[in-house]
Structures are given as structure tokens and as C-alpha cells.
């Protein structure tokens, strides 16, 4: 059973200054894959071993999972992987803003905590501001991959990403869901779900050339779609 925490708790609201690539990796000039909500880091650690010419960073809000995962990351002979503790919606935007242009090549959010009830929508990992930070950090043609085994979790993520206008699906990708994971290493949750022969809902997005919408406009449009009962009444 997945044990998840409330990201809106006061203890998770303090912004953390995440280290720059120069302090994290043996070869900071290599392309970066950011995995948001990496849990124990099995996927990101496996990818780092298979792809030593990439740098891999996982962030996770559950500190007890981060400590052993980052200890294992520091033992990597390639010096190309780290697992860090943070609340993605509080600390990642500033970190991505400091990255050199085109250094971030891929972002993934895999099997995020299942905050699927509407009253818990503010606890979801993919919020408009985080999505716009990802869109700002990714250059056109770079990948944003999301997957979940819960439709009530993945559907709002897909709708928000498409609503932004900043991402397209690659030509030829199956719609509405990809059948395969474009990453070469599955997460622990993915292994479990596949072993149970349960469905996995996957979408690969690619950053396009569309300019980002104003964050206030995106948040307002998203509120109207995701929580229509609270949308302001139009003026007479």
C-alpha cells in the first residue's frame, strides 16, 4: 500500500534551495532527466546505471524514502544520479530557473500519490504553476512523460497539460494512452501493477514552440474546468 503525505502541511511549505548541477554530478554538462515523486528511486537509479551519459535527479516529499535512495545514489560509480527531498510545488520552480538553457532534457511524473477526490485537488503534484515551470525549463522537442494506474489521477494531469497549449503528443503515439513506457526502467509501482495485469495509463508529451500562457489565466481556466461549481459568475 502506498503511504502518502499531505503536501499542504505546514512542514512542507518551507522552500528549499536545491543544489545546482555542479554540486550534484561528476559531469554537470550532461543532459538531465528530472523524475518528480521518485519514491525509493528504483527507476531513476536504474536509468542512471543504464545511461551514464545522462544525469538523473529524483525528488520526493517522503524523507524516509529519500535517505536510503540518495545513499545508494552517492555510491554510483558514474556520479550521475541524486535523490533529493523537497516539495516539488514549493522548491522545484526556482531550481529549474537556474539551469543552463537546454540542460533539462526530460521530466517525468510517474504514479503520483492518488489524490483523486475533487476536494483534494490542491494536493495533486501537477499544479498549473509547476507545469509552467516545466514548460519554461524544457526546450521545444524535449519530453514530459506522465503515467498512473488510476484514471482519476491521470485524467486531470492530461487535461491540464493539454489546456496549457505548451505540449503536443508525438506523431504516431497511440491515443488516448501509450501501450509502452518510453523509459527503459519501470518504477516499483509499475512492476506491481503490470504483475497484477492491471492497466497503466501513459502519455508522452513533447514541448512545442507555443509561448506559455500567463499563469493567472491558466489557473483561472483550470479552476473553471476542474472545479466548475466554484467558478465566478459572469458579470451581467
Image: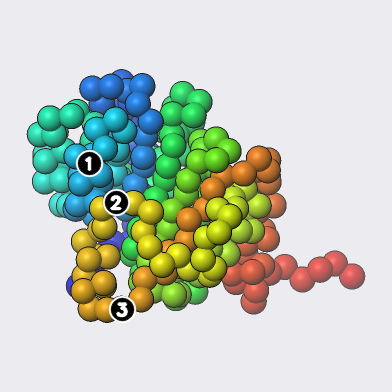
Q: Which residue is mark 1?
A: 50
- 55, 88: nearer the viewer: 55
- 36, 10: nearer the viewer: 36
> Residue at (11%, 41%) from the top-left corner?
72
Colour treatment of the image: rainbow
Between the residue at mark 3 and the residue at mark 1, the CA separation in whole angstroms equals 27 Å
| x, y percent for residue 54 | 31, 33
> Which numbered disc flags the more N-terminal residue, 3 or 1?
1
Residue at far right of view = 236
Q: Which residue is mark 3?
A: 198
- Residue 1 visible? The answer is yes
Label 3: how many Cα within 10 Å (few below 14, some 14–19, many 20+): few
Label 2: how many Cα within 10 Å (few below 14, some 14–19, many 20+): few
Instruction: Report if the CB atoms under discs 3 and 1 are less than 8 Å apart.
Output: no
Between the residue at mark 2 and the residue at mark 1, the CA separation in whole angstroms equals 8 Å
Q: Which residue is mark 2?
A: 184
Element at label 3: loop
Quadrant into which the C terminus falls: bottom right
Question: Would residue 119 be found to the left or right of residue 37 on screen?
Answer: right
Against 186, is 114 above or below?
below
Between the residue at mark 2 and the residue at mark 3, the CA separation in whole angstroms equals 20 Å
Amino acid at each position: 500500500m502506498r503511504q502518502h503525505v499531505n503536501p499542504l502541511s505546514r512542514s512542507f511549505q518551507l522552500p528549499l534551495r536545491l543544489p545546482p548541477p555542479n554540486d550534484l554530478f561528476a559531469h554537470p554538462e550532461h543532459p538531465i532527466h528530472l523524475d518528480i515523486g521518485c519514491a525509493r528511486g528504483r527507476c531513476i537509479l536504474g536509468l542512471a546505471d543504464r545511461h551514464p551519459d545522462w544525469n538523473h535527479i529524483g525528488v520526493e516529499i517522503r524523507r524516509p524514502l529519500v535517505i536510503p535512495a540518495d545513499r545508494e545514489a552517492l555510491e554510483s560509480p558514474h556520479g550521475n544520479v541524486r535523490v533529493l527531498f523537497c516539495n516539488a510545488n514549493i522548491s522545484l520552480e526556482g531550481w529549474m530557473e537556474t539551469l543552463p538553457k537546454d540542460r533539462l532534457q526530460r521530466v517525468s511524473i510517474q504514479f503520483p500519490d492518488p489524490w483523486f477526490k475533487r476536494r483534494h485537488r490542491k494536493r495533486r503534484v501537477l499544479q498549473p504553476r509547476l507545469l509552467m515551470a516545466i514548460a519554461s525549463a524544457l526546450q521545444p522537442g524535449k519530453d514530459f512523460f506522465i503515467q498512473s494506474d488510476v484514471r482519476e489521477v491521470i485524467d486531470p494531469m492530461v487535461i491540464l497539460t493539454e489546456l496549457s497549449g505548451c505540449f503536443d503528443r508525438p506523431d504516431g503515439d497511440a491515443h488516448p494512452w501509450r501501450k509502452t513506457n518510453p523509459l527503459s526502467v519501470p518504477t516499483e509501482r509499475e512492476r506491481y501493477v503490470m504483475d497484477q495485469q492491471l492497466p497503466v495509463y501513459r502519455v508522452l508529451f513533447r514541448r512545442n514552440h507555443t509561448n506559455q500562457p500567463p499563469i493567472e489565466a491558466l489557473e483561472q481556466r483550470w479552476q473553471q474546468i476542474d472545479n466548475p461549481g466554484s467558478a465566478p459568475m459572469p458579470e451581467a
